[in-house]
Amino acid sequence: MEPLEKVSPQEFLAAGQTYLTERCKIDQGRIVCKACGTGIREFTVPVSVHFALPGFPDCTGSGQVRALPVPYCPTCEGEPRKRSSCIHIQ
């Protein structure tokens, strides 16, 4: 899963839930890829959490940076290419 940009907190959480539901399964207590059986790994991404300002489509203003895990299959996907993400608070 690639980190998302310019999404709401709800969209960020929903994307992670969708990824785990559609692409992963539990096998002997481990979360693994449904397609290949490889263990799912996490990539920690710095996520800027800031307000979305009307009329400004790009990221603006100050916010806090949080480190959040992004799941991925090292066999099917490889490590995520994006190294950061942002969440917009409405």
Image (spheres, grey):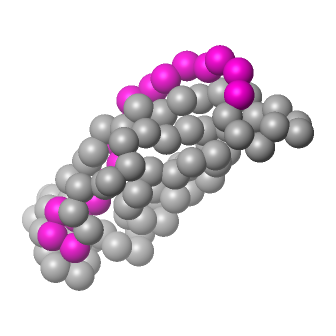
> In front here: 7 or 57?
57
Q: Quadrant of the N terminus?
A: bottom left
What is the x, y in percent for residue 71? Answer: 32, 54
Q: Is residue 26 visible?
A: no
Q: Is residue 70 left or right of residue 53?
A: left
Residue at 62 percent across and 20 percent down: it is 63
Considering every residue shown, the one lying at the far bottom of the view is 35
Which quadrant holds the C terminus?
top right
Residue 60 in which image quadrant:
top right
**Looking at the image, residue 40 lies above or below residue 77:** above
Question: Is the residue 65 above or below the residue 10 in the image?
Answer: above
The residue at the point 57 percent across, 48 percent down is: 5
Q: In the visual, does 75 lie left or right of 88? A: left
Residue closest to the eye, 67 or 27? 67
The question of residue 19 being in magenta is answered with: no
Query: Is 40 in front, or is 58?
Result: 58
Give the image location of residue 2, x and y in percent: 40, 57
Left or right: 4, with 43 as reference point: right
- Stretch in magenta: 60-76
Looking at the image, can residue 69 be seen? yes
Give the percent coordinates (x, y) of residue 48: 54, 30
Looking at the picture, how far across and down is residue 3, in whole percent? 44, 51
Q: Which residue shows up at 42% across the image and 65% down it? A: 19
Quarter residue 80 falls in: bottom left
